[in-house]
Image (cartoon, rainbow, N blue to C red):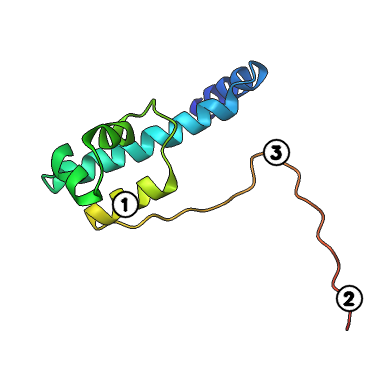
Amino acid sequence: MKKRARDELEEMFEELGELDEVRALTRKKVVADSLRRAMKSQRVTPAEMARRMKTSRPTVYRLLDPSEPGVTLDTLERALNALGLDLEIRLVPKAGAKRAPTRAKTAA
């Protein structure tokens, strides 16, 4: 039942033209929440985080704000370094997306 409800929600957002935005905000929420949990477990305050990142507290607050989409990879990388973390990124085809045809290799 959960899969069906998720599929229906995705269809609804796709019909509204908002599916990509919803997915981006969901990813940002996951990243912000993970950073917040890491900071809490290491007892790092936003002020200390800003010091470690060599930035301002408002930048840290933007990084931790799940509704703020404008976080750069550079800022994220500095945050991860400040917490001793690494980031793994995978690129995967979208569900239902057609793959580009591959070219056949020719003998040289």
Say which residue label 3 marks: 96
How far separated are the C-alphas under marks 3 and 1? 35 Å
Q: Earlier along the polypeptide chain: callout 3 or callout 1? A: 1
Q: Secondary structure at mark 1?
A: helix
Amino acid carrying mark 2 in the image:
Thr
Say which residue label 1 marks: 78
Amino acid carrying mark 1 in the image:
Arg
Q: Secondary structure at mark 3?
A: loop
Measured as percent of width and height from the top left, residue 31 is found at 36, 40
- Relative to residue 90, is residue 61 drawn left or right? left
Residue 84's place in the image compared with 7, above or below, is: below
| In the image, farthest residue toward the bottom | 108
Residue 97's place in the image compared with 100, above or below, is: above
Say which residue label 2 marks: 106
Measured as percent of width and height from the top left, residue 61 is found at 26, 32
Residue 54's place in the image compared with 20, above or below, is: below
Residue name at image x 71 percent, y 41 percent = 97
Residue name at image x 47 percent, y 53 percent = 89
